[in-house]
Image (cartoon, helix red, strand yellow):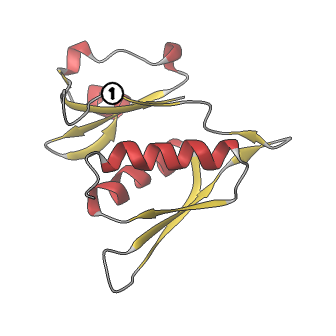
Amino acid sequence: MAMSDPIADMLTRIRNAAKAKFNSVDIPGSNFKTDLTKVLTEAGYIKNFKFIQDDKQGVLRLYLKYADGNKNAIVGLQRVSKPSRRVYVKAKDIKPILNGMGVSILSTSKGIMTDKKAKKENMGGELICNVW
């Protein structure tokens, strides 16, 4: 059976692996997921990642980040825009997550970026998820 929302599946795999204290998690690869992972890495929520090529679509291996005392760097992940209900925001309507402690990730015409970068470049787009 085909997966209807691969981004929600990716976020759920990351959330579950972080709660289980895994060092890494494997996700079926795609260009969008790779770009989303780059943004998560730049924001400091993931330690590192690598794309493993195989005969099919490839595998994206994410190495999760933990603070002192095995505390998760990712406290929460929330999917905002879904295939059944897309959520678009203008640059002026982008709101900070937890007073700036978290980030929103947007898909804009210039690629995937955080809310701070989108606001700086005055770009709106589809609100993919919130991470804190």
Residue occupying image coordinates x 20% and y 37%: 83
Residue 91, quarter of picture = top left
87 sits to left or right of 36: left
Q: Is residue 81 above or below residue 20?
A: above
What residue is shown with label 1?
80
Left or right: 127, with 114 as reference point: left
Answer with the quarter of the image where residue 22 lies: bottom right
**Is residue 93 shown above or below 69?**
above
Coordinates of residue 2 in the picture (x, y in percent): 25, 57
SS under mark 1? loop
Q: Residue at x 39, y 82 (%)?
A: 53
Q: At 17% from the left edge and 20% from the top edge, which residue is drawn?
A: 90
Q: Nearer the viewer, residue 11 or 89?
A: 11
Q: Residue furthest right?
A: 69
Counting from the top left corner in percent of width and height, residue 18 is at: 65, 45
Seen from this angle, which residue lies furthest front?
A: 1
